[in-house]
Image (tube, rainbow, N blue to C red):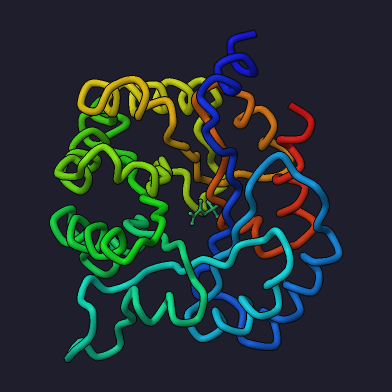
C-alpha cells in the first residue's frame, strides 16, 4: 500500500494534460472544447489542454469557469523584440495563460531546441511566474544501449539544475520516451516506474527528498484509456501528458478518470 500512503504525505498533484500539437483549427477547437465540457466531472487530477497558439485565447475564454486549464505548447525566452514568429511569456500571460510546455521532443527534434536553449526558456517562464511542464526522454537507441538513465539525467541537469529549490514549486516534469510518442508503443508500467523513481532520486540527490517528493512527474507516450490506469497506478507516476488520445473528448476523460478508479 505504498502508493496512496506516500501520496498523502507528499501532496504532489496528479495531472493529466492534453497536448493537441498542430491539430484543430478554430472551429475544431471550439467543437472539441464543447465535447470536453460535456465530459467534465469531479476528478482527482488537475486537467489541462494545450491547443495551438491561434486558438489559445478562444479556448481560455470557453473554459474560464471550468476546472480545465488552458496551457501553451511553447514560448520564446525573450520578453519581446525581433524574433519573427515567436511568442513570449508576457504575451501568453496577457491572455490568461499560466502554464507552458517546454522541451517537448518534437521541439527538440524538429526545431533544434537544445538543453541550453531550454534552460533559457525555463528561466524566462519562471521569471514571469509561469508554471512549466518540462519534457524530456530518451530515444530508442539510448534505451537499447542501456543509456536511457544517463540521457535523462543529463537533460534534467542541463536545463534545470541551475535553479534554486523554490523554483520546483512551478515545475512539473514529463518523462516522454521518444520511442513511445505517437507510435502506439508504451513504456511498460515497470519501465515507467523505474525511470520515474530514477528521476525522483536524481532530484533528491541535488535538492533533497522534500523537493523531490513534491514534484509531479507525468508519463507521456501513447497513453490510452486502455493502459492509463496501469501506468498511473505506479507510485512515482503522477499523471500523463497525452497526445493523440487528447484529441477525442471521451478518450481524454477516460484517461483523466483512470485516476478516480485507482
Ligand atoms: C506527446 O506528444 O506528448 C505524446 C505523449 O503523444 P502520444 O500520446 O500521441 O504518444
Q: Quadrant of residue 100?
A: bottom left
Left or right: residue 114 compared with residue 16:
left
Q: Quadrant of residue 198?
A: top left
Q: Residue at x 37, y 49 (%)?
A: 135
Vertical position of residue 161 compared to residue 50: above or below: above
**If the image is split into quadrants, where does the N terminus sit?**
top right
Q: State left or right for residue 160 relative to residue 49.
A: left
Q: Residue at x 64, y 18 (%)?
A: 4
Q: Is residue 41 left or right of residue 189?
A: right
Task: Locate residue 213, reporting x and y percent.
Answer: 42, 25
Quadrant occupied by the C terminus: top right
| Residue situated furthest right in the rendering | 38
| Residue 212 visible in the displayed image | yes
- Asked if residue 176 shows in the view, the reply is no
Quarter holding residue 36? bottom right
x and y percentages locating residue 258 in the rendered image? 74, 37
With 153 as the anchor, is 10 left or right in this view? right
Amino acid at each position: 500500500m505504498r502508493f496512496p500512503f506516500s501520496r498523502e504525505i507528499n501532496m504532489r498533484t496528479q495531472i493529466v494534460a492534453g497536448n493537441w500539437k498542430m491539430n484543430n483549427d478554430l472551429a475544431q477547437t471550439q467543437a472539441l472544447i464543447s465535447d470536453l465540457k460535456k465530459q467534465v466531472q469531479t476528478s482527482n487530477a488537475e486537467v489541462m489542454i494545450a491547443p495551438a497558439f491561434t486558438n489559445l485565447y478562444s479556448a481560455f475564454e470557453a473554459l474560464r469557469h471550468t476546472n480545465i486549464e488552458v496551457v501553451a505548447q511553447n514560448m520564446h525566452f525573450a520578453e519581446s523584440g525581433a524574433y519573427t514568429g515567436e511568442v513570449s511569456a508576457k504575451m501568453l500571460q496577457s491572455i490568461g495563460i499560466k502554464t507552458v510546455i517546454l522541451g517537448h521532443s518534437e521541439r527538440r527534434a524538429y526545431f533544434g531546441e537544445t538543453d541550453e536553449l531550454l534552460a533559457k526558456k525555463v528561466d524566462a517562464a519562471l521569471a514571469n511566474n509561469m508554471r512549466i511542464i518540462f519534457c524530456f526522454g530518451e530515444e530508442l537507441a539510448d534505451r537499447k544501449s542501456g543509456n536511457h538513465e544517463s540521457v535523462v539525467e543529463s537533460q534534467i541537469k542541463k536545463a534545470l539544475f541551475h535553479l534554486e529549490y523554490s523554483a520546483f514549486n512551478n515545475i512539473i516534469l514529463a518523462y516522454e520516451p521518444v520511442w513511445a510518442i505517437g507510435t502506439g508503443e508504451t513504456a511498460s508500467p515497470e519501465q515507467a516506474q523505474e525511470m520515474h523513481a530514477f528521476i525522483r532520486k536524481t532530484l533528491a540527490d541535488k535538492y533533497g527528498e522534500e523537493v523531490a517528493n513534491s514534484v509531479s512527474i507525468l508519463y507521456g507516450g501513447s497513453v490510452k484509456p486502455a493502459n492509463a490506469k496501469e501506468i498511473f497506478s505506479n507510485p512515482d507516476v503522477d499523471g500523463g501528458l497525452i497526445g493523440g488520445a487528447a484529441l477525442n473528448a471521451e478518450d481524454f476523460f477516460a484517461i483523466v478518470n483512470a485516476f478516480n478508479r485507482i
